[in-house]
Amino acid sequence: MTTKVRLIDVTKCVGCKGCQVSCKNWNQLPATPTEFSGSYESPPDLFPDTWSRVRFNEYDDSDKVKFYFAFFSCMHCSEPACMNICPVKAISKNSLGAVQVDRSVCIGCGACKGVCPFSVPRISNKMFKCTLCSDRISNGMVTACAKACPTGAISFGDANDKIAEAEARVTELKNNGYANARVYGKDELGGLGVVYVLADTPDKYGLPAEPKVSLADTYFWKVALGPVRTLATVGLAAGALSGWLQMRKEEIRKEKEGKE
Amino acid sequence: MKISRRSFLWISGAAITGSLALKLGCAPKQPTTEPGGPVDVEDLRIQYAETTTAICPICGVGCGILVYTENGKIVATEGDPDHPINEGALCSKGSALFNMYYTYNEKGEAVPNPQRMTKVLYRAPKSKDWEVKDWDWALTTIAERVKKTRDEYFQEKNKDGVTVNRCTALAWLGSAMCNNEENYLFQKFCRSLGITNVDHCARL
Amino acid sequence: MTNHWIDYKNSDVIMNFGGNTAENHPISMKWIQKAREERGAKLIVVDPRVTRTAAVADLYAPIRPGTNIAFLSGLINYALENELYHKEYVLNYTNASSLIDPGFGFNDGLFTGSKAAENGQYTYDKATWAYQTDAEGKTLKDETLQDPNCVFQLMKKHYSRYDVKTVSEITGCPEDKFREVAELFCSTGKAGKAGSILYAMGVTQFTHGSQNVRSVAILQLLLGNIGIAGGGVNAQRGQSNVQGACDVGQLYHILTGYMPMPKDAEKDFAGYNATTPKSGYWTNRPKFLVSMLKAWYGNKATSDNDFCFDYLPKLDKDRSHVAMYKYMAQGEIKGMFCFADNPAVGGPTAYRKREYAKKLDWLVVADIFENETAAFWKAPGENPEEIDTEVFLLPAALHFEKDGTITNSGRWIQWRYKAQEPLGDAKPDLWIVDRLFKAVRKAYEAGGKFPDPILDMVWDYGDDADAVKVAMEINGYDAAGALVENFTKLADDGSTSCGSWIYAGYYNNESDPPCKRREKETEGIGSNSKWAFAWPVNRRIVYNRCSCDPEGKPWNPELPVLWWDGSEWKRNDVPDFNATVPPADTAQKPFIMTPELQARLFSSSMAEGPFPEHYEPWESPVANKMSKIQFNPVSKVWYPGDNAEVGSSEFPYIATSYRLTEHYQSGIMTRNMPWLNEVMPEMFVEISPSLAGKIGVKSGDKVIVESKRAQMECKVAVTPRLKPLKVNGEEKEIVGMFFHWGFMGLSKGASANDLIPSIGDANTTIPEYKAFLCNIRRVG
C-alpha cells in the first residue's frame, strides 16, 4: 500500500520538460551526452544521471495528428520487484511509498534492472533512479518534478485523494469523447506509486499495457545471483571476490547480525 | 530581496513584505505525519542557504526565481512559489538556470560553468587568437577608439545648415537581456555621442 | 500586451495565432489551463504545424506561413457578415461611424494615392486617407453606420472580398476548419464573453507584420475584446526584457518612453514640438521630453537653450538593424558596440553579419559567453590573417550577479536582486557602460569634436554604478526635488525631471519602491496590483474604460475591471480615463492615446493603407490571389534580386523558422548549458512524411537546406505534425527550422538564419523570418 502518489495527467502536459530538467537540477546530476534521436524526446532512455524524462509520441490518426507527452520515471511500485530481487537488500520502501536504494549497500549487480517491469534502474557501479525527492518530501515540499510543472500535469499527494482526482478526470475525458481514457497505475501490479490519467491506451504513451514481473527474469536473476546472495547472507569470505566486495559483504553481515 | 526559507516552505502563498535578510540557523524540521507512519526528515541541501528573489532571464513571462546561496556562492535555483505568475513552476530553461552559473563535473561536483567569460579578451587586427587584457587597458583603449572615430566622422550640421550633432560612423546594439537601468544608460551613452545607429533584438 | 499573463485565466476563448505559448512561454500555460478548468474556456491554435501548444488545443487549424492577413481578414469578414460583432462597443469605442474622404478608395491591391517608386515598389500620398470634417475641424460621423463613406461601411466593403473559400485557397486552411475557428472565436463578440489573441513573432516577423497586428486589433475591437478582463491583443515577448529595452529607447527611432527621435526635417526644438499630436494624451509630450532632457542635462538644460535639445542627434534616415548592416557593408560604420546581442546568429541573412563585421575598424562585444558575433573572425572558412577588425570582448556578469529591473510582457517592472558576485573579471553591464562613459568623458576633457553633450551629461551613479541611483533618475523628480509620484506631475518648464516618463512611479520612494513590492492578490480578478509595478501608472489592463458599457456597467459583471456605482467609479485596476467624472463624459473617449480618443478601425498611420490587405511574402510559391500587387508595395527592398522568384522551381518549398522550448534565441546562453543540450542536443529541420518520401530521407538523416542566399547542413526530423497545405488547389510542402545554433558554444550547428532574407516590414522593418522559399535534399 502506497500512501503518497505522484499523479501524472498527460492531458495537461505541454511537453516543456521542466520536470525533467528540474529533476537534474535538484538532484545535482551531471548532463548525459545525447544525440538527436529523430524527435523532441531526449535522452532516448533513462541513464544513471537522468532519472526522469518526458516521452514524446506522434500519431497520424485520420484527420487529427496526436502529439503525446508523458512524464516517465520510477513507478515506486507497491510490491517492487527490484526490492524483492536485490541480493543485498539495498532497496527498500519508506513509509511514503518511495522505493529507495541505499547505495552504501548496493553492489551494482543489475538484478533490479533485469526484473523491473518498467526498466527503470540504471547501473553505473551502483544503481541510480528517482528517489521521489524524499529529502524534499520529508521537509514538507513536493517533488522537484511536480514543483516545476506549470500546468498541474504532475502533482503529488495522498494516494486516495489523487486516485479519486484521476478517476474524476477520466470520467470527464470519456464524456468529452476520449473513449480510451483510463487511469493507469491504480491496479497495475497491485498499485503503483505513480498514477496516470491517460487519454489513450497505455502503449500510445510508451507504457506497458499490462506490466508484469517476468517469472523468467526473476528466475534468471535468482540463479545468476544465487552465489552472491549466499555469500552475502552467510558471509563466507571468498577469495575470488574483489576486496571491495569483501568490504561491502562484511558491512552487510554486520548489519544483518545487528538486526538479528 | 533576501527571504527566509522558512517563509518559502511553510507560508508559501502568503505575502512576504519587508526586506529582512535572514541567514537560516537551522531548517525547520517538521516530520510529516502520514497515514503510512512518520517519515524521517532527511537533510535538505539548501537548509542553511540564504535565499534571494530574482526574475528569470529567459522569456517575457517574468517568472520568479529563488536563488540559494552559501558563502556567497549560488548552490541552487528553483521557482518562487510566492510569485503570482509562476507560483513556483518553471519550464526546462527556467529549471536549468543553475547550469548557466555552475555545471556538475563527472565526480558530481559543482564547478563554475567552464564556458563562461571571466576575462577581458582582445583580438588584434589579423590575429588568430584572443589576448587576455585587464579592464583599465580595455576601457582606455576603447575610449580612444571611440573618440578617434567620433572626431573623424562627427557631423554638426547637415547640408541645409540644420544642427544634427550625430556620428553615423558609430553603431550600438543594446539588449533585451540587459536590465532597464542598463539599457537606459546605453541610451544616454549613445545619444550623448551622437549615435543614431541604435537598435536591439526587439527588431529581430 | 494590453492585458497580462495571469489574465489569461479570465478568457472564454483563447486563440494562439502566430505564437506558440506552450513552447516559448510555457509557464503561461498555467493560466490557460486554469481558464479551461474553471471557465470551460477553449483553446484555438492556428499554426503551420502541430506544435506543443496545438497538441493540447481544443481546435487546431493549419495556416500557410505568410498568410495571416488573409486568415484574420476572413475572421473579420465572418464577424461582419454574420453580425457577430459587439455592436454597442463598436459604435461607442471605435471610429466605425467616422466619415472618410469620399476620394478614398482601393483598387486591385492599392489604396488611393499610390505612386510607382524604385524596384517596382510604391509610395503613398495619404491625402485621401482622412476624415471628413466640419468647419471647426470636427470629424463628421454617421451613428447609423449606413453612410457609404463611414469607416464601418468601407470596412465591410474591403473585407467582403475575404470569403471563406478565398481565405481557404490562400491560407491552405480547409474551409470547414476555418469555419470552426471563426464560429468559436467570434462567439466572444458579445457582452459577458471574452476572447484573447496571443501572438508573438509568428505575427510580427513578416514584411506585413504590423498589418498583421492591426488585423488582430481590428478583430478584437469588432468583438469588443479590448480593455476587458480575459481579452486583449497580447504580444508575448520572447525575451525577458525586450519590453523594457524598448521602453527606455534602445531603438533607433525613439527616445525613452516611445517619444520619437528628432529628425532633420524638424530642424529644432520648436519644429519637434510642432509635431506634438493635437489631441489625446500625447499632447503632453513636451512635458515628457523636457523632463527627459532635464534628467540628462540637469542644470545645463534651461529654457534659454531649449533644454539642450540640440545635444540630441537628429535622425537622417532608417537606421534599423537591416539598414544599419547595409551601411556597415558600405563602409559608413567604423565602430560598433554590441551588448548581449548576437546578430551573427540571430540576425537575418546571418552570415552577412559576420561578413560585414570585417568592414569595421573596431567592435566591442559584452557577453556572458563567447558568442559568434565576437568570434566572427574564427568562423569556419575564415582566414583571420585577412581580417583587420579589432575586437574587444568584455566579460559580463550573469543576471543573478547584479541588481536592477526587467519588464515582462504584461508591462510588470520587477526588481531582481543580486545573489552572488560576478565570476572572475566579469562585471555587470551597468558597471561596464558606466566605466566606458567615464573613460570617454575623460578622453573628451582634453578636447575633441563637440564635446558638450558628453561633458554636460548628468552621470553620477557612484564609483561602482548603483542601479538604485539609475532607477531613481528614470523614475524622475518633481518640482520640489522629491521622487515624482507619477507622470501626471511632470511639467514642460524645466521644473521636473524624468528619464522615461512611462516609468514614472516605478521607483517613486526609497523605502518601498513599487517595483520591489511582493504582495500577492488574494481576491479580485488577478490584477495583483501590489505585486511589482506595471507601466503606465500601475495599470494592468489598458483601455479599461471599454470593460464597461457607456453607462459604466461592466459588460461582464462577474469580472469587473471597473464599475460606476451611481456616484463613483469602483475599481479592480487603475482607470485608463478620467475617473473623477461620471461615465457619460468618458464613454466617447476610451482610447486616450489616440488623437480621436477612440480606437481606429481605419488608420492613416500605417505605411500600407488604412485597412490591412493580403500580400504574399517576398518569397512565395504562388501569385497573390487578391490582386496584381504580389508583395507589400511599400516595403523597402534593401537587396534587390536577393529573393527567389514567385513559384520558383529551384526553391519549391515554403520555409519557416521558429524556436524550441529547450533553447533560447541565438542559443549562446542555452547551448552552453549542458542540461539543455542533453534535452535538445542538435540542430535539425522538420518536414512532412510526404516530403521525406519525395527526397528519400528518414528521421536522423542529414540534409542540405538551401535558399537563394545560403545553404546549411543538418539532420532532419520527419513528422506528421507538418503536412503539405493545399494552396490554390496545389499541395505545398513546408520545411520548418530552428534558429538556435551557431559555430560557437558547447553544442554547435548550422544557423538557419543564414537562409533568411534581409527584408523587413514597411513600418517596423522587422525581417521576414517566418516565410521564405527553400530547397531540401539528402546529403550523399
Image: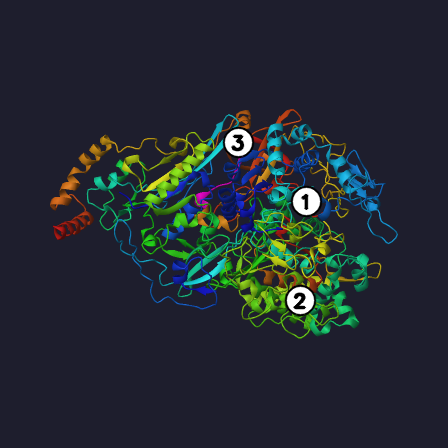
Query: Front-most of A199 and C299?
Result: A199
Q: Is residue A190 left or right of residue C266?
A: left
Residue marked by disc 1: C221
- Do discs 3 and 2 belong to a common subunit? yes
- Do discs 1 and 2 belong to a common subunit? yes
Q: Which stretch appears magenta?
A: C677-686
Q: Residue B148, how many percent across, how many down? A: 69, 64
Chain of the residue under label 1: C
Q: What residue type is labelled 2?
A: Cys
Residue marked by disc 3: C779
Chain of the residue under label 2: C
Mark found first going from the N terminus, 3 or 2: 2
Residue C313 seen from this side: no
Q: How far apart are marks 3 and 1 (CA)?
A: 50 Å
Query: Front-most of C770 and C352?
Result: C770
Mark found first going from the N terminus, 1 or 2: 1
Residue C498: numbered disc = 2
- Residue at 53% across / 50% down in the picture? C668
Q: What element carries label 2?
A: loop
Q: What element carries label 1?
A: helix
Chain of the residue under label 3: C
Q: Which amino acid does label 1 sit on?
A: Leu
